[in-house]
């Protein structure tokens, strides 16, 4: 683990962004980044430009953040997590190992490891998506994909849970509470 908070303090600052110098393995030269206090990166992590890590974020080994990702205070990512471009995680969000979220997702829920793959639920512009293994598809497409597979009954049960969470999400956002 490296203390990324201490490292970026030595970098130049332009308009509130730390600018990555050459020779840093986990970020491309010239990339902009904002890092709060006590942020740690595991071995082999890579961060895209425009990422913001709030105080106390921890990324496990081999995590990848796409361009413009934002992690709220205290976020923890397990090993091999991948976040697509523009993903936003709220405060104290925890995602387990091998979690994959596509571009622009918000409000992720780590649904656990079932039938050989970790499943994560997140929303893109109000539409529920499921990340599983190397797949990233809408909740409806995920249910269709697994419906005719008798070896995926646990995954289908998890999709019922995902539908219940989506109903809550839609109700909260319709009321303007989020």
Image: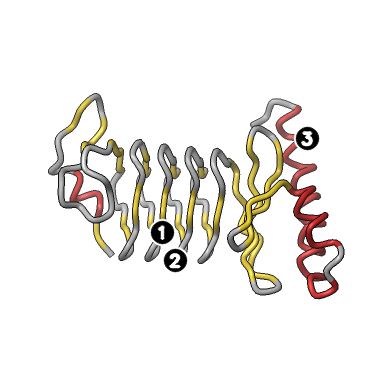
Q: Is residue 94 left or right of residue 51?
A: right
Q: Residue at x 55, y 56 (%)?
A: 100
Q: Quick check: 174 left or right of 46? A: right
How far from the left and from the top, in percent, is residue 154? 78, 70
Secondary structure under tag 2 reads: loop
Q: Earlier in the sequence, mark 1 or mark 3?
A: 1
Foreground residue, 146 or 15?
Answer: 146
* Dot 3: element: helix
Give the answer, above or below, for where 32 lies relative to 82: above
Q: Which mark is residue 171?
A: 3
Q: Is residue 32 above or below residue 57?
A: above
Marks 1 & 3, CB-CB < 8 Å contact: no
Q: CA gap, disc 3 to disc 2?
A: 33 Å
- What is the x, y in percent for residue 99? 55, 60
The quadrant of the rendering that contains the N terminus is bottom left
Q: Which mark is residue 79?
A: 2
Q: Secondary structure at mark 1?
A: loop
Image-based side of 178 in relation to 95, left or right = right
Quarter in which the C terminus is drawn: top right
The residue where tag 1 is placed is 63
């Amino acid at each position: 683990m490296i203390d990324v908070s201490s490292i970026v303090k030595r970098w130049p600052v332009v308009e509130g962004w730390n600018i990555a110098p050459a020779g840093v393995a986990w970020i491309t030269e010239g990339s902009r980044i904002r890092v709060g206090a006590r942020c740690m990166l595991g071995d082999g992590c890579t961060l895209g430009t425009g990422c913001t890590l709030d105080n106390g974020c921890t990324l496990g080994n081999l995590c990848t953040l796409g361009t413009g990702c934002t992690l709220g205070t205290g976020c923890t990512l397990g090993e091999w997590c991948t976040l697509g471009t523009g993903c936003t995680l709220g405060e104290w969000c925890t995602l387990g190992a091998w979690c994959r979220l596509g571009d622009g997702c918000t409000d992720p829920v780590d649904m656990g490891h079932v039938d050989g793959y970790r499943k994560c639920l997140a929303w893109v512009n109000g539409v529920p998506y499921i990340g599983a293994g190397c797949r990233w598809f809408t909740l409806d497409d995920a249910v269709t994909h697994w419906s005719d597979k008798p070896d995926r009954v646990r995954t289908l049960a998890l999709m019922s849970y995902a539908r219940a969470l989506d109903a809550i999400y839609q109700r909260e956002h319709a009321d303007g509470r989020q």
